[in-house]
Amino acid sequence: MTHDTLSALLERLQAPILPPTLQAATVRYRFTLGSSEAWDILLHQGRLALDQTTGRPDCLVECTAEEFGAVLSGQHNLLTSFMRGDLRIQGPLAAAKLLYTFLRYAHLEEAHG
Amino acid sequence: MTTENVSILDGNTFVVTDRRGDIDASPTDPQGLFQDDTRFLSQWVLLVDDRRLNVLSIEDLHYYEAQHFLVPGTGTIYVDSPVSIIRRHRVYRGLSEHLTIMNHAGEPKELQVRLTVDADFADLFEIKDQLVKRGTPYRRVDEGKLVLGYRRDRFCRETWITSSRQPEYDTGALRFRLQIPPHGEWSTHFLVETVDVNLTAAGVGASRMAHLDADHQSRVEEVERWRRGAPTLASSWRALESTYQRSIEDLAALRFYPYLFPSGALPAAGLPWFMAIFGRDSIITSLQALPFMPDLARTTLVMLSEHQGARRDDFRDEEPGKILHELRRGELTAFEERPHSPYFGSADSTPLFLILLDEYERWTGDRPLVQDLEFAARMGLEWIDRYGDRDGDGYVEYERKNQDSGLENQCWKDSWDSIRHADGRLATLPRATCEIQGYVYDAKVRGARLARTIWQDRALAERLETEAADLKRRFNRDFWIAEGQFFALALDGDKHQVDALTSNIGHLLWSGIVEEDKIEACVRHLLGARLFSGWGVRTMAEGDAGYNPIGYHVGTVWPHDNSLIAWGLRRCGYRAEAAHLALAMLEAATAFRGRLPEAFAGYPRALTGWPVEYPTACSPQAWATAAPLLLCRTLLGLEPVGEHLLVDPALPEGIERIELLDIPGRWGRADAFGRGRILLGRRPLGTAS
C-alpha cells in the first residue's frame, strides 16, 4: 500500500456519529506489516490520519498488508481478526479498544471524481 | 448436565468433572475445563494400577475449589482398601490439582499411577451442536511440560500441563511408578494452563499460573471483601439466611472480568452454557442485586455501552444504539461462523439498559455515570423508535435478519417454540411480545426523569412522557383480551393477538404500563391455578395447548421471572400477593439447598410435594442466583425516595423477622427491619411448627 493510497483510504473513512470519549481521544498506532512495511496512524478528533509526527506509538498492531486493508475498509471486523490471531496487539488494550470502536462507527464514503 | 457432575468456577473459567474428579467428555455430558468458550481439557482421568477409582465423598470447599476422596476398587466389600487418594481441584484461569496418595498398610506399596489427558478445543457451540472441528491438533513435550495444541490458520490455543514431580510422558498420559513407604504418602501438584497463543505472544496473559498461590490468597481476601461489602441478613427463618449467603457466594463466583475491561466485574449468565456476557441477563441480575452490590450494575452499564450497536449489520442483527445480546470468544465466533462478536439478537436489552441506568442512579446517586452514559442512553432511545419499531406501528417487534444462526425469538423466552397461541400455533413474525412494550414504557418514563433531572433537557423529557402515555393507552387497547381478562402474549406478524396466558403479564405489572382497572384481573390470573404451581408462576398456563410442565419456556417456573412478578405485584399495591409469591419461591430455594436453578418443572405443588428439577437447567445461573435478593427487597419494601431509603415491610406471618443491615445507597448505609404480619395461614417450609 502506498502513502497516497492509504491516505486516501483514511480520508474516506468517516464516522458522523461517535461517542464523546472517542471524539476526545488521541491515540497513536503503529501498524507493522511484515518485515519491511510500517505505518503510523493517529486517531484524533474522531478521525484517522497518517501520523506525520515522531511521537511514540501508544499501541503496536502487527498483521499482513491484506488484513490491514481489510480491517480499515470495514471488510474485516477488528475484534474477530484479533480473536483469530490475524492481528496482534501490543500495548494497552484500552487503546486497541478505541480503534475497534471507531471502526465500528466508521464507514467508507464514496470516492469523488 | 447430570447431577452426578461436580462444577467449580471462577468467572468464565470453569471445570466440570464427575464425582471422581475425572473429566471424560462425551457429546451429551459437557465435562471439561473451559475458558473463553473453549474446552481446554476433554479428558483428565486418573488410573491407579490401570483401574478407575471409587468415590468415598466430595467436599465442596468454595465455589472455585472441591476435594474428592477416593479409593482403588478392592473388588469386594470384605476387604478394606490399603490405599486412599485425595484430589483437590482449584480453578483459577486454569486448573490446579493436588494429588495425594496414602498407604495405610504396614508394608511398602508399589503403584502405577497414570493420568490420561486430552483436549479437543471444542467451541461450546460445537459441543451443543455436535460439530466437527476444522483445524489440526498437535502435542509435544516441551521444557518439562506436556503441550496439547490446536491450530486453524493463525488461531492457536494450547493446554500446558506440568507436574511438580517429573512424570514419564507417553502419548496422552503422564505416568508415575511409585513406592510408598508403610503409613506414608506421595503427592504431586498438577497445573493446567489455558493459553491463547496469540495473546501470550503479545505479552498478554502469559504465565498466569506462575503466581498461583499469591493470586489465590489475594482472591480469598477479595471474596471476603465482597462478602463484607454486601448487607448482612438475619432472619428467624434460618433457611432464608442460608439462601441469602448462597446467593452472595454464587454471585461472587459468576463475576466475570472481561479481558477488554479487566478492572470491573459483571455477572456471566450461567453454568455451563452461558458463561459469557449477556445483555439481558447481566442487566436483570444487576437490577436484582442493586440494593446489595451496586458495583455490578455500574460495570454492566459501562461494558454494554462500550459494545453498543454502531451500524447496521444483518449478520450480527446489529443496529445503531442497540444493546448486545451475547459476546463470545470461541473459534466459531472468531471465524464468523457464529455471529457472537457480539450478537445483538435481543429486542429487550436496550429498554432494560435504560431502566437499569435510572434505577442505578436512584439507588446510588451516581450522577457522573449517568452523564457519561448520556450518549449511549440517547442512542438507545433512538433505537427504540427507529429500529425497534420496525414497521412504525408504535410497538417494538423483532424478526431476525440473520436467518442462518440468529435467534428466532429475541425476548427473554428465546427458545424457538415459546411464542404460541392458546391453541398451540406458533405466532407469525415479526413478533411484538407484551413485556417488551412494558419495558419500553418504563424506559421512556425513566428516560424522561433522567433527561429532566440530570441531562437538563426538558424538551426530551416532555416528548418521552408524551410518548409513554400514548404507548400505555394504545397498549391497553391493542393487547387486552377482554374475554379472558388478561393481556395477549404478543401481537403476531398480522397484528393479531397471541392469546396464550403466560407469566409475561407479571412483567407488565412491574413496568407500570397496566391501567388501573386491569390490574386486579392480572393478579387473579398470576396467582390462579392455571399459572401458579404452588412454587411459583409458570411461564405458560396449564390448559393452553402448548403447555408442558417441563417445556423450557412453555410451562416451567423461572425464579428470575417470579422475582420480577413479585416486584410487580408489590409495585401495584398487592402486598399480600407479593409476599405469598416470594415465600413460595424462597421455599423452593430451600428445597434446592439455597441455590435456585435457572428453571424447574411446573408440576402442581400438591402433586409433587417438592419442586422437580428441569433436566438441563443451568446452575448456578446469575438471574436465578440473584432472585432471592430481589425477593428480599420486595418483602422489605425497599425503595429509594430522594436521598432516603424507604422501608415498608410486608412479610408473611410465618417469617417472624428479617433484618437487613448496611444496605448501600446514596444515603450511605441503612438498615431495614421487618416482622411477619400478613396472614397466609401456614409457616414457611423448613421452619419449626
Image (tube, rainbow, N blue to C red):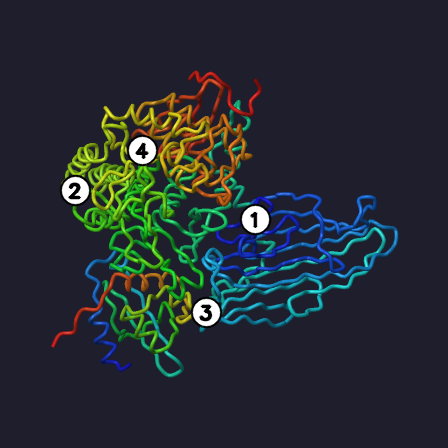
- Name which residue type carries label 1: Ile
- Name which residue type carries label 4: Ile
The chain ID associated with circle 1 is: B
Image disc number at residue B610: none
Mark 1 lies on residue: B8
Mark 4 lies on residue: B505
Image disc number at residue B460: 2
Both marks 1 and 2 on one chain: yes
- Name which residue type carries label 2: Leu
What percent of the width, then of the height, locates residue B586?
A: 48, 30
Residue B661 visible, this orientation: no
Q: CA distance from mark 1 to mark 3?
A: 27 Å
Contact, mark 1 vs mark 3 (Cβ under 8 Å): no
The chain ID associated with circle 4 is: B
Contact, mark 2 vs mark 3 (Cβ under 8 Å): no
How crowded is the residue under tag 1: few (<14 C-alpha within 10 Å), some, or many (20+)? many
How crowded is the residue under tag 4: few (<14 C-alpha within 10 Å), some, or many (20+)? many
Both marks 1 and 4 on one chain: yes
Q: CA distance from mark 4 to mark 2?
A: 29 Å
Contact, mark 1 vs mark 2 (Cβ under 8 Å): no
Q: CA distance from mark 1 to mark 2?
A: 48 Å
The chain ID associated with circle 2 is: B
> Residue B313 appears in which quarter of the rendering?
bottom left
Mark 3 lies on residue: B155
Can you tell which of label 1 and label 2 is closer to the viewer? Answer: 1
- Against B14, is B333 above or below? below
Can you tell which of label 4 and label 3 is closer to the viewer? Answer: 4
Q: Quadrant of the image for the C terminus of chain B?
A: top right
- Name which residue type carries label 3: Phe
Q: Secondary structure at mark 2?
A: helix
What percent of the width, then of the height, locates residue A30?
A: 35, 73
